[in-house]
Amino acid sequence: MKDSIFNIQSEADFTKSALMVFKHQFKHNKVYRSFCDLLYIHPSDVKTIDQIPFLPIQFFKTHEVLSSTDKIQEIFSSSGTTGSVTSKHLVTDLLWYETSYLKGFECFYGDIKDYTVLALLPNYLDRKGSSLVYMVDDLIKKSKHTESGFYLNNIDELAKKLIKLDKKDKKVLLIGVSFALLDLIEQYKFNLKNTIVMETGGMKGRRKELIRNELHTILSGGFRVEKIHSEYGMTELLSQGYSKGNGVFKCPPWMRVLTRDTEDALTILPKEKSGGINVIDLANYNSCSFIATQDLGKVYTDNSFEIIGRFDNSDIRGCNLMVL
């Protein structure tokens, strides 16, 4: 199944694979099966992607969401405030994740070996279980450049290295959490010509939250780059969407984003309509590939999408069928 999913070539391929994965997870994922049963939805009733039930993302906080009986190789967990319940993604086959992020990066940026990867992810490095750190650590290793590496609090060294590499016409990927990138440009002046600056979102309580346009305007001015790139990922997904500017994301062929009605969680909206973000991530073969997130957004006719906000917890509707 892995080979067919990561070699999807068309909409027909995607639909065929998605329906096959749905049947597999309905059969093997107890949590997802219970959710579908409460909705009175059976695979025999599902002919299109729009008819597939999307599991509320909160279930990764309260249940073991698994479609496999294999031994768990890794547990990825979300960041959270002290005492809060974090999401846990139980991964039984890390090769699914590694294949997804490597092929996904290649779809949009080419071979990772062409880049020096500089990672500014202090809050993620401070804790265990980050899927982002796992991915970036592997990208750093596979880049094969000795200058690639993580930076925690040594931003003086990072700034000097970034300026030096950029002047040498090296292709550089600077990937960082929003607040750390803002800290960097407040202390140093840049005029980058050969560097992709990619933010992974999140002030994590370190700064006032900014809307993406405001954040990107500040960052592009500080780094003197035309566009700020973004990565759309989360603990509960094994795939990422990427934006090369303007906050518009595209997915790799095995991932798709839909929007749902905010008043009726079971209704999928047409393109160009704002609503709750539903994600199909076929790399989640051994957990759940159909997830209703707490993000709000809009999907365009070419399947690109934009994130425009988050649900307030009080606004989640149609997601409380299984409060156990």
Image (cartoon, rainbow, N blue to C red):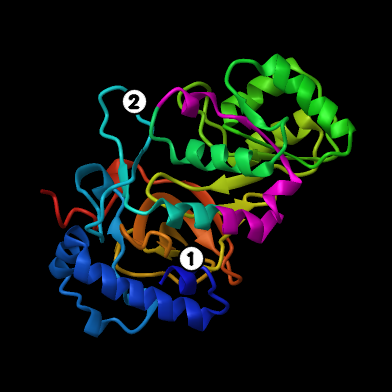
Q: Amino acid at mark 2?
A: Thr
Residue 153 point in image, percent of width and height: 59, 16
Q: Is residue 251 visible?
A: yes
Residue 75 pos. (x, y %): 33, 41
Report x, y in % for residue 221.
Answer: 78, 32
Would residue 97 be found to the left or right of residue 22 on screen?
right
Q: Which residue is more in the foreground, 34 or 271?
A: 34
Provide residue 276's location: percent of width, then percent of height: 40, 57
Count of all numbered marks drawn on residues in the image: 2
Give the Cα distance between marks 2 and 1: 30 Å
Q: Residue at x 71, y 22 (%)?
A: 158
> Quick one: quadrant of the N terminus?
bottom left
Circle nearer the N terminus (2, 1): 2
- Residue 143 is inside the magenta segment: no
**Is 311 on the left or on the right of 226, as rendered?**
left
Q: In the rendered image, which quarter is residue 23 located in?
A: bottom left
Q: Which mark is residue 111?
A: none
Q: What crowding class fits label 1: few (fewer than 14 Cα within 10 Å), some (14-19), or many (20 or more)?
A: many
Label 2 Cα crowd, 10 Å radius (few <14 / some 14-19 / many 20+): few
Q: Which residues are magenta?
A: 102-127
Task: Tell me the SS state at disc 1.
Answer: strand
> As drawn, which residue projects farthest toward the right?
168
Vertical order, 12 against 57 (above or below):
below
**Is there any visible trace of residue 240 in the rendered image?**
no
* Disc ID at residue 81: 2
Q: To which residue does mark 1 refer?
A: 256
Q: Residue at x 71, y 56 (%)?
A: 110
Please tell me whether residue 116 belongs to the stretch shown in magenta.
yes
